[in-house]
Amino acid sequence: MNVIDDFLFTEIMSDEKNGLEACRIILSCVLKREVKNINFTAQKTVPGVSEQSHGIRMDAYVTESSESSGEKIRVYDVEPDKKSSHKDGLPRRSRYYGDLIDTQLLETGTDYEKLPELVTIFILSYDPFGEDAMYYEAATIVKTHPQVSYNDGIRRIFLYINGKLPDDAGKEERSLQNLLKYISNSTAANVTDDYTRRLDGIVKITKSKKEVGIKYMKSWEREKELKEGGREEGRKEGREETLKEIQPKLDEATRRADSLQKELQDAKARIAELEKANNAV
């Protein structure tokens, strides 16, 4: 079990204390500053704007408040993802998540300026944009005048766990690389600094829980059954497909055999008639 795996990440987040600390570690490392005054909700669901609309479920939904006023100033959505099949739809998925989150953040009568900053962070086992980089950040710009500031309060960060550092990478970038390496492969060998040491402590606590081990074994058995069932279904479909392909050939062969059998019977009948005629002579 590694932190990037949905099972372990969910189990970490299901513990209020450890989940909060794990979010603090990840955010502080990614944002390059100490993140303190935060609250989080694991597996937060946001319904669609109508019964027919698609809702979302966020792995870790975090809010950051001003220490002086207590006002909500930032919202974070942290999403580990190992499914490379999501790659093509990732930008629009990020857009949709952000739009639905925004619908929850502004109360009636509140000025738009009060809308908190929204930061989505995807931690990915695949390269989302094919540049072999560890860190990508997308932002909204004025396309015709890129020098003009356009701050809509949205940051979209995509982290590729196997991506390369830039040549001029500093200590903070290397800390992020260490953290991503640990998230990808959560073993003692990858505990190399304070961030990974703190996160490793949380992982050990989570893995040591008896109920987590039981749940993991059950989920592993279910996954195994689904895979075996899928293989058997695939074999069945393959047999059916093969039969479907060869059936016309079997039918044609049967027709030819019936025709040959009839010709053979006719030939035997003619021979019998000839023999009868010869005997008469």
Image (cartoon, rainbow, N blue to C red):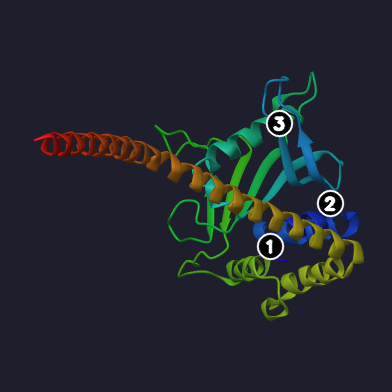
Question: At 35% from the left edge and 38% from the top edge, which residue is drawn?
Answer: 254
Residue under pointer 1: 29
On the rendered image, what quadrant is the C terminus found in? top left
- Work out whether residue 239 or residue 20 is closer to the camera in this orientation and state it: 239
Q: Of helix, strand and loop, which one carries label 1?
A: helix
Q: Position of residue 237 (x, y in %)?
A: 53, 44
- Work out whether residue 141 or residue 256 is closer to the camera in this orientation and state it: 256
- Above or below residue 66? Residue 160 is below
Q: Amino acid at mark 2?
A: Asn
Proximity of marks 2 and 1: CB atoms separated by less than 8 Å:
no
Question: At 80% from the left edge and 63% from the top edge, which residue is drawn?
Answer: 217
Q: Amino acid at mark 3?
A: Gly
Left or right position of 209 against 7: right
Q: Quadrant of residue 74?
A: top right
- Is disc 1 surrounded by few (<14), some (14 to 19) or many (20+) residues within 10 Å? many
Residue under pointer 3: 55
Question: At 61% from the left edge and 55% from the top edge, which residue is drawn?
Answer: 82
- Name the mark nearer the viewer: 3 or 1: 3
